[in-house]
Image: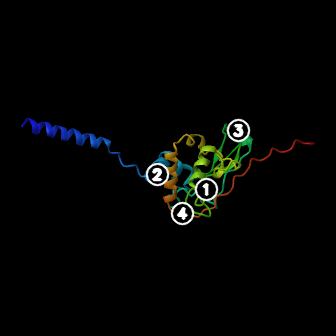
Amino acid sequence: MRKVVVVLACGGLLTAFIGCEQKAPAPDPVKRGEYLITIGGCHDCHTPKNMNAAGMPEPDMTRMLSGHPSEAPYPTWKPEDLQMNNAIASTNTMLSAWAGPWGVSFAQNLTPDKETGIGEWTEEAFIQAMRTGKHQGQPNGRDILPPMPWPGIAKMTDEDLKAVWAYLRSIPEVKNQVPLPVPPSMPPAAPGN
């Protein structure tokens, strides 16, 4: 009887030890990317909005992550407008276009559309863009402008950025050509100059 108990105990310990050695399945990168996009607030700017009955903007998920609608107006500004209102920026009702000292910036189309989205980008270009704040990750590319929080995103792990990339590649394509950024206006020349 004692031998049976010892054999069963050893077998139980061996089973427990082998079970501990098994690795948990790797998380699905698409689901992880969806989670990161959601908690990161990406829909706040990159998904166009519709106004609800209370006059509040709600994400239009039929145009999920497609950026500033090409046909939508965008805010303009003059430094004195913002100073008068003690503000640094203004935005449109969709929160997809922002005006400030940098000019006017537009939330980009993040869908995998090859003509108007990021469908022709590579994973490496995406990660480099998020790390450097340069469009398409190009060293000489234009700056990714406010309010895009790329400095915080740059601190994400490669694994998390790859998960975001995997999710963005999995969503429906939306054809929407977002305007290029508008540079800040030059102040008017002083009289007599």
Q: Earlier in the sequence, mark 2 or mark 4?
A: 2
Mark 2, mark 1: which one is toward the viewer?
2
Q: Label for residue 84?
A: 3
Q: Mark 4: which amino acid?
A: Glu
Q: Upstream in the sequence, badge 2 or badge 3?
A: 2
Q: Quadrant of residue 74?
A: bottom right
Distance, label 2 to label 1, CA atoms, is 20 Å
Identify the image quadrant of the C terminus: top right
Looking at the image, is mark 2 or mark 3 nearer the viewer?
Answer: 2
Residue pictured at 63% horizontal, 61% vertical: 177
Work out which residue is located at the far left of the displayed protein and give it: 1
Q: Which mark is residue 34?
A: 2
* Element under disc 4: loop
- The residue depicted at 69 percent of the width and 55 percent of the height is 180
Disc 1: which residue: 68
The mark lying in front, picked from 4 and 1, is 4
Residues under labels 2 and 3: Cα distance? 40 Å
Image position, residue 6 (x, y; %): 14, 36
Q: Which residue is mark 4?
A: 173
Q: Secondary structure at mark 2?
A: helix
Amino acid at dot 3: Met
